[in-house]
Image: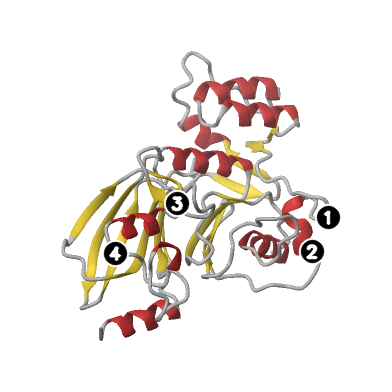
Amino acid sequence: MEQAVRNGEWLELDWSALADADKGAGELAQPAAGSHPHEVRKWLLARGLFSEKWVNRLFSVGGIKWEGDKLRLLTFPAVDPKTHPFYRQAISGPTIDIPPVLYEDDFCVVFHKPAGMKVHETYAGERGTLDEAAARHALKAKDPLPLRHIHRLDDYTSGPVLYAKCDLAQWNLDEAMRDKAIDRQYIAVVQGKLAKRAGTIDEPIGKDRHHRARRMVTPSGEHAVSHYERVEAYGKASIVRVRLETGRTHQIRVHMSYIGHPVIGDEMYGGNTRLLTHQALHGERLLFPHPWTGETIEVVAPWPSWLEKLVSSVSGM
């Protein structure tokens, strides 16, 4: 499958490479070059390389073609920015800064979201979101694909956010999220000196019925697991590295507060705001299986200046 290349809206697969890799299709032989798309569709489904839904969708729109020695799949159809909801805002109104791109190829892109930027709008017409910035990035590249964010970060948490650039990538990455194959690692500066060098917080998280935006540890909540490691401990604060096994809303903030070490700056969950007015939480690393090759992609997001400054401040406490 390494012999696949993008050519405009099409993904082109080399015939000879496909022939060499023709396994898993049972008794259904690889169709000859130039075969009718229906025969190719049956062969693709038998091989199980792609979801049945995606292959059938391609077939329904004429998205399977055999030309010469290339199998062509309509993988990257462009959208009309004037009518597509993801792009409408991006082509009107004032421009916004596009966050740094940490990784990009034909299938996906990872942005370094700053603290204070929402991933998506919370009401119709809201401006300044990462979704809008992603759309502007695609328009700047003259490549308006149907971008979708695969996961989210809280408004005031910085770090990498992964976007799929086509339906195939989205379905594969969504499946990776469900299978917990996407690994997210965070750095947090918390109050107090953690006694344990490492630990696991396995406590369910649900809504706080007394506060609409808050979450809390509750027996009726959803399963939530956070693994933490103490990186540094000072007199009144600690730096911890946290890896999420699940992805509940406010998970790290709720779990660290639950064990008596709220995140500095996180007023909602008991954090002191004297040194920072938003939660001291940064997505440091993201690992995910590439939606086409399956290769593990590691993306590292450098510490933002506010985190460097805060660590310098608490180190003297």
Mark 4, Cα crowd under 10 Å, few <14 / some 14-19 / many 20+, is: many
Q: Which circle, 1 or 3, is nearer the viewer?
A: 3
Q: Which residue is mark 4?
A: 261
SS for callout 3 = strand
Question: Label 1 vs label 3: CA separation?
Answer: 38 Å
> What label does residue 82 carry, if any?
1
- The residue under the point 36% across, 43% down is 204
Nearer to us in this view, 139 or 10? 139
Residue at label 3?
215
Residue 306, numbered label? none
Q: Are marks 4 and 2 in contact (CB under 8 Å)?
A: no
Q: Earlier in the sequence, mark 1 or mark 4?
A: 1
Residue contact between numbered discs 1 and 2, judged by CB atoms under 8 Å: yes
Determine if residue 30 is in view.
Answer: no
Mark 1 or mark 2: name the one nearer the start of the chain. Answer: 1
Point 47% across, 65% down: residue: 157
Towards the viewer: 159 or 296: 159
For numbered disc 4, what is the local secondary structure? loop
Which dot, 3 or 2, sits closer to the camera? 3
In this view, 238 is above or below 216: below
Under mark 4, the amino acid is His
- Is 285 on the left or on the right of 92, as rendered? left
Q: Mark 1 is on which residue type?
A: Lys
Amino acid identity at mark 3: Arg
